[in-house]
Image (tube, rainbow, N blue to C red):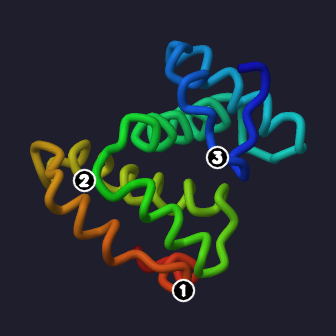
Amino acid sequence: MKYYNPDKPLNVSEWLVLDDEQRKILVYNFHESIGAEFQDDGALTMHSYMHVVVENQIATNVDLVSETVTKLVRQGLSRHEALHAISAIIVEDIFDMLKGAKSEFCPKKYRRKLEKITAKRWRKGQY
């Protein structure tokens, strides 16, 4: 895989051959190529890794992730925006763990959040 475009479905076999660092570089390069503005290099790196997390879930058929992307795109988000919406759910859980509000990732709660999110809710910041 030479290029990554979050608005295009992955070639799963090409994606899975890469390691996470190679995947992150592809995502990072994409965002740089479109002139995406980030506070600093660390923010772009973290953003890129979140793309990798969600794309990995899609590529490995994690329950409901691909279906949620499809749902959000049908509702009017770009695929790229849909990846951001799912990333936001994951980041919220990570933040809760870091501040001690919960001790571990709960797949059932993640699934419920994926079921609940809509393009309308995402646009309102309610995910």
CA distance separating discs 1 and 3: 22 Å
Name the residue that disc number 1 marks.
Answer: 120
* Residue kind at label 2, given as amino acid type: Asp
Residue lying at 52% horizontally and 76% vertically, measured from the top left: 122
Of the numbered discs in the image, which one, if any, rests on residue 96? Answer: 2
Of badges 1 and 3, nearer the viewer stands 3
Which secondary structure, mark 1? helix
Say few, some or many: other residues with alpha carbon within 10 Å of mark 2 (under 14 / 14 to 19 / 20 or more).
some
CA distance separating discs 1 and 2: 24 Å
Name the residue that disc number 3 marks.
Answer: 9
Q: In which quarter of the image is the N terminus?
A: top right
* Residue kind at label 1, given as amino acid type: Lys
Q: Earlier in the sequence, mark 1 or mark 3?
A: 3
x and y percentages locating residue 60 in the rendered image: 38, 35
Q: Are marks 2 and 3 in contact (CB under 8 Å)?
A: no
CA distance separating discs 2 and 3: 30 Å
x and y percentages locating residue 69 in the rendered image: 51, 61
Of badges 2 and 3, nearer the viewer stands 3
* Residue kind at label 3, given as amino acid type: Pro
Say few, some or many: other residues with alpha carbon within 10 Å of mark 1 (under 14 / 14 to 19 / 20 or more).
some
x and y percentages locating residue 53 in the rendered image: 45, 37
Which secondary structure, mark 3? loop
Of badges 1 and 2, nearer the viewer stands 1
Residue 113 placement: quadrant: bottom left
